[in-house]
Image: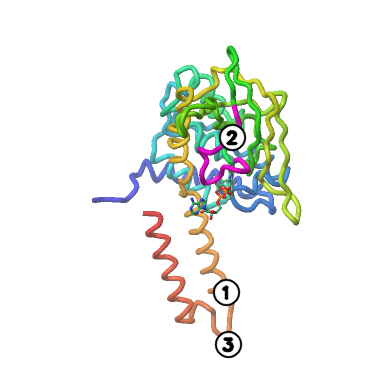
Amino acid sequence: MDFELTDEQKARRKEFFDACKELEKLKPLRLVGIEGVFEYDECWEFHLHCARQFAQKGWLSLAWPPEYGGTGNMMDRVLFAEARGYHGIPGVDIFGVGMLAPTLIQAGSEEVKKEFLPPIARAEVMWCELWSEPNAGSDLAALSTTAIRKGDEYIINGQKTWNTGAHRADWGFGVFKTDLNARKHHNLTFILLDMKTPGITVKPIRYMDGDSPFCEVYFDDVRVPAKNIVGQENEGWAVVNTLAGFERSSLTEIMSLVRALEELVKFCNETKRNGQPLSRDPVIRNRIAQLACELEAARA
Ligand SMILES: Cc1cc2nc3c(=O)[nH]c(=O)nc-3n(C[C@H](O)[C@H](O)[C@H](O)COP(=O)(O)OP(=O)(O)OC[C@H]3O[C@@H](n4cnc5c(N)ncnc54)[C@H](O)[C@@H]3O)c2cc1C
């Protein structure tokens, strides 16, 4: 079997890598790691700048169905993720583009897809995830924040926590208890809500040394249109499982490690110990070779 990229894929790969290489020249020094974009204003602005550039090229909706603004194919999505990972470029909303969009494509109603997918593709709306609670983490289905149906609305009361980037987000997707009597896993509904809705209070959680990307989010009689649900009422657990399947893709992280390894090799070639470059030391050579093999296996 031939695993080489086709000429067309090589050209596409070059296009993604060239764009990310250019953006890297503008990257703030303080931007470190995926969650770094949420911490400092300059990092968030850079994230939005990259997102708008990618949106113009149609790269935030790679492999989506064309009727919702989709472009390209799955291989494009892989190559784009590799380029961003290698150059450490944000611009892809991990929650909106990475998790919610594929979930909506799979589990959303036609109405919900038409309303929420295009603004994600255009980088107009940034999202956060409102799942964990002070007493519901690993056992998420034990959550207690309620969304009680009243006419055409849900009224939400309670608290979420550890919500990455909630202080930056325009919209949030969350899971809430909508039936107080039904059995566990059949009493939750997956709801989309505007973070500017009255009654929502977002409190960033501070690290000992300053800012953090995490927040607490409080809901005090927050009214959300009932049409903003994904899947069926009280069957939100199925949607949670669908979304969780998209949460742990690590293509960008692997390529960031490829870059780190290249820099390590460069350091070992340039740094001398006892008059010899570190890269001549058999123990170091062996360790680097091991890392290279592990990374190659991870990419495959
Ligand atoms: C970097 C980061 C980003 C996050 N971002 C978000 C976000 O954007 N939105 C959001 O909603 N949440 C977010 N979270 C929260 C995350 O989903 C929770 O931390 C996670 O679900 C675990 O919950 P917990 O922290 O309450 O730990 P707990 O559930 O209290 O677990 C604590 C420890 O107990 C162990 N444990 C738990 N239950 C059992 C059991 N039955 N048997 C044996 N051991 C057990 C666990 O393995 C763990 O070691 C984030 C967390 C991290 C670390």
Q: Nearer the viewer, residue 129 or 113?
A: 129
10 Å crowding of disc 2: few (<14), some (14-19), many (20+): many
User: Which is closer to the viewer, label 3 or label 2?
Assistant: 2
- The three-letter code of the residue at mark 2 reads Ser
Q: Secondary structure at mark 3?
A: loop
Q: Secondary structure at mark 1?
A: helix
| Residue 299: in magenta span | no
Q: Is mark 3 within 8 Å of ligand 1?
A: no
Q: Nearer the viewer, residue 139 or 4?
A: 139
Tally the marks. Answer: 3
Mark 2 = which residue?
144
Placement of 25 over or under 52, stated as above or below: below
Is mark 1 in CB contact (under 8 Å) with mark 3?
Answer: no
Of mark 3 and mark 2, the one earlier in the sequence is 2
Q: Is mark 2 within 8 Å of ligand 1?
A: no
Residue 285: give x, y in percent of width and height: 45, 76
> Left or right: where does residue 3 sit relative to residue 99?
left
Residue 150: give x, y in percent of width and height: 60, 15
Circle number at residue 274: 3
Mark 2 and mark 1: span between their CA atoms? 57 Å
Q: Nearer the viewer, residue 281 or 230?
A: 230
Residue 102, can we see it?
no
10 Å crowding of disc 1: few (<14), some (14-19), many (20+): few
> Left or right: where does residue 58 sit relative to residue 63?
right
Placement of 128 over or under 35, stated as above or below: above
Mark 1 = which residue?
270
> Left or right: where does residue 224 sit relative to residue 11?
right
Residue span colored magenta: 133-146
